[in-house]
Each structure stands twice: as C-alpha cells, then as structure tokens.
Image (tube, helix red, strand yellow):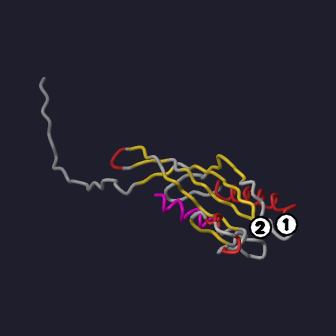
Amino acid sequence: MLTAIYNHIKTVLTGIKTEEDKAVIKTVDIWNNQTALPPEEQAFRLPAVFIEIPGAEYGQLLNGRQMAEPEIILHVITDSRKGKLETAMEINRRLCNLINSKLYATKSTVSGSIIRTRSENDGNFDEWIENRETYRCCAFDISAQKVWSNAEIEEIRIATIG
C-alpha cells in the first residue's frame, strides 16, 4: 500500500507540465535526507520534491483487509542562490500550492484524496528553500484479504411443524 501511494504521488508530480510541455519539477525521488549534503555535492536538479512516508498505523477491517491514514511528507526544494532569494519563497509557495491542487484532485487505486495538513519552512535560505508539506490520505491494504470461492449447494428442504 505505501509503495502504491509513493508511486501514485511520483506519477502525479512528474506529470505536472508547463504550457510548453516541460516538467515543472526537475527531480522527484524518495526522501533520503538529501538536503544534509553540502550544496557542491548536490545530486539533484531544482526544483525538487522528495517523498517521505514515515509509516502507517493500520486498523483491521473484515476478511484480512486493513485501513490506514499514512502521513506523507513532501520536501519541496527550490533554488535561492544567485540573487534569487527575493522571489524564492514566493516560487516555493506557488509550487507547494500547485502540488496541493494536483494531489487533491486525484485518487489512486489504494487511496482517496491526498489532503495537505501542515506546512513547515526550514528557515535556512543559503542555497535553497525547503518546505515540508505534510499530507494524509485514507488508504486500504488488501494484501492479506481472503479469497472466497463460490460453492454450489444442492436444494435444501426444511420441514416445519404445524
């Protein structure tokens, strides 16, 4: 289920295009603390979005199915170097809002709408601006669902008294 959510978000984000059919987001990948690396070792193009799904608590449904509301954190990173600081925050916020509108409007095979619940800014504008956008969705896991087969039953007659 978590893999399906990650793949769905990645597909939505890579599908955001400009009017010239160019990708708006240059890098979409799984979160691996990429912003801890020195900027000269930066191995991703900006703007970038890294997807973090810290985990999920599952609730048991009937027949082996489970439901969860996983937390999803998108690390939205935009450039603030080379005199871009004046507009960097505005660009970052616009990108965060664009992502929100695209995610809310879609549904995956395992989840409903993905809803933004929190925004945080890292406050370190030396090389880039990183906003952490937290989302939640209601998702279902059917990997343990029991598969029942139909059984044919011969006609049954029940006698009543009276």
Tag 2, which secondary structure? strand
- Neighbor class of circle 1 (other Cα within 10 Å; few <14, some 14-19, many 20+) is some
Where residue 134 appears, x then y in whole percent? 63, 51
On screen, residue 147 versus residue 117, left or right, reads: left
Where residue 153 appears, x then y in whole percent? 18, 50
How many marks do you count on the picture?
A: 2
Residue under label 2, please give it. Answer: 79
Amino acid type, mark 2: Asp
Q: In the image shown, does 57 or 81 lie closer to the viewer? A: 81
Amino acid type, mark 1: Lys
Picture residue at 59% right of the left edge, 68% below the top:
29
Query: Is residue 53 a member of the stretch shown in magenta?
Result: no
Q: In the image shown, does 145 or 45 lie closer to the viewer? A: 45
Residue under label 1, please give it. Answer: 84
Q: Which residues are magenta?
A: 1-12
Picture residue at 68% right of the left edge, 67% below the top:
48
Sequence order check, earlier mark of 1 and 2:
2
- Neighbor class of circle 2 (other Cα within 10 Å; few <14, some 14-19, many 20+) is many
